[in-house]
Image (cartoon, rainbow, N blue to C red):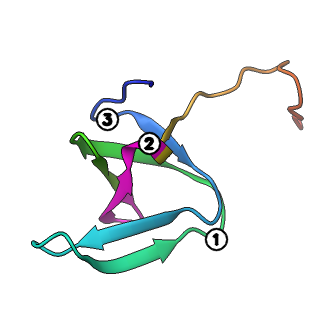
Amino acid sequence: MISLNSGDLVYLPANFMLTKHNSDGTVSQYCELKSPCVCILLKSDELRSDLFYRGQTWTAPNDMLTPYVERQQGEENVSYTS
């Protein structure tokens, strides 16, 4: 498993579900992403991470997070415009 730290960028695909939780752990709100995005990881525990998305803190399960790695020009399956 890849280690993520506070301040790391994470890639979230379209249709990813972010949640907010009550103090008892139940879900109070959810947000389904309409398009892929990159978010900042704020903090993490063993199971979940808090992410900054559109000015709010949302939660996502750690096992679903993918580190964002910027692709360099010339990599396979990437197109560029000038």
The span from disc 1 to disc 2 (Cα, nearest Å) is 21 Å
Question: Tag 3: residue type?
Answer: Gly
Instruction: Give percent across and percent down for residue 51.
Output: 34, 52
12 with respect to 23 (left or right): right
Is 50 in the magenta? Answer: no
Residue situated in front as seen by the camera: 37 or 15:
15
Instruction: Give percent across and percent down for residue 27.
Output: 29, 76
Q: Which residue is mark 2?
A: 63
**What crowding class fits label 1: few (fewer than 14 Cα within 10 Å), some (14-19), or many (20 or more)?**
few
**Mark sitting on residue 58:** none
Q: Is residue 63 above or below residue 67?
A: below
Instruction: Give percent across and percent down for residue 4.
Output: 36, 29
- Image point (27%, 35%), residue name: 6
- Image point (38%, 55%), residue name: 60
The secondary structure that most of the magenta stretch takes on is strand
Residue situated in front as seen by the camera: 11 or 3:
3
Q: Which residue is mark 3?
A: 7
The span from disc 1 to disc 3 (Cα, nearest Å) is 24 Å
Question: Tag 2: residue type?
Answer: Asp
41 with respect to 35 (left or right): left
Q: Magenta residues?
A: 52-63
Counting residues from the start of the chain, the first of labels 2 and 3 encountered is 3
Counting residues from the start of the chain, the first of labels 1 and 3 encountered is 3
**What crowding class fits label 2: few (fewer than 14 Cα within 10 Å), some (14-19), or many (20 or more)?**
few
What is the residue that sits farthest to the left in this orientation?
A: 23
Q: Which residue is mark 1?
A: 34
